[in-house]
Image (spheres, rainbow, N blue to C red):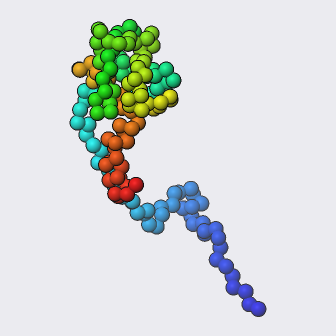
């Protein structure tokens, strides 16, 4: 049986290697092109401030940043209307409720029932500071508003 010698695993040291010079790779690595990024939509409106919050068991909702943008302070009276499944809260001196010390809005029971809001719901809030309005988007309304976008995102089938 004859054995074939294997080539050495350690590269042969040359004089520049022994003197501490840096080796230059024989070929340069190929530069990879960056992945294409999706186009970011431009916000059509800058007069809306968005936030999210949990509605507690008593129907209280708040977002400090939104209340700051609206300029609403504790004790201000607010009124409620429902428009196309959205709850519209307006500052109204004859309003049915007032903001508490934490500037929380307490949704009346009849408003919660009409919009099918239950305990511990996550809500999308939109403040319109110029109009002094707070719009509350219940989950059912969000599902309807986003249904076509979701269908398009998954190729037409859910």
* Quadrant in the rendering for residue 95: top left
Q: How many marks?
A: 0
Q: Nearer the viewer, residue 45 or 53?
A: 53
Residue at point 23%, 36% (across, down):
44
Instruction: Please say whether residue 73 is visible from this viewpoint.
Output: no
Q: Nearer the viewer, residue 74 or 97?
A: 97
Across and down, in percent, residue 77 comes to 34, 10
* Quadrant in the rendering for residue 108: top left
Please determine whether, in this image, residue 153 is positioned above or below residue 112. below
Residue at point 27%, 24% (across, down):
128
Across and down, in percent, residue 14 comes to 57, 66
Residue at point 73%, 86% (across, down):
3
| Image side of residue 25 versus residue 114, left or right | right
Instruction: Please say whether residue 119 is visible from this viewpoint.
Output: yes
Across and down, in percent, residue 110 comes to 40, 23
Q: Quadrant of the C terminus?
A: bottom left
Which residue is at the far right? 1
* Quadrant in the rendering for residue 73: top left
| Image side of residue 152 versus residue 122, left or right | left
Please determine whether, in this image, residue 66 is positioned above or below residue 153. above
Residue at point 41%, 36% (across, down):
139
Q: Nearer the viewer, residue 8 or 113?
A: 113
Q: Nearer the viewer, residue 25 or 68?
A: 68
Across and down, in percent, residue 15 comes to 57, 64
Which residue is at the far bottom? 1
Q: Quadrant of the N terminus?
A: bottom right
């Amino acid at each position: 049986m004859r054995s074939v010698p294997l080539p050495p695993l350690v590269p042969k040291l040359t004089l520049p290697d022994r003197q501490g010079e840096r080796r230059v790779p024989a070929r340069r690595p190929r530069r990879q092109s960056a992945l294409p990024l999706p186009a970011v939509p431009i916000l059509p409106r800058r007069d809306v401030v968005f936030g999210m919050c949990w509605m507690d068991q008593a129907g209280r909702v708040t977002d400090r940043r939104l209340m700051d943008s609206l300029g609403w302070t504790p004790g201000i009276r607010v009124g409620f209307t429902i428009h196309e499944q959205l709850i519209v809260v307006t500052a109204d001196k004859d309003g049915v409720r007032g903001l508490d010390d934490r500037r929380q809005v307490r949704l009346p029971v009849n408003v919660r029932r009409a919009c099918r809001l239950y305990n511990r719901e996550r809500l999308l809030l939109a403040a319109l500071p110029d109009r002094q309005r707070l719009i509350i988007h219940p989950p059912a309304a969000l599902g309807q508003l986003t249904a076509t976008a979701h269908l398009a995102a998954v190729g037409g089938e859910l």
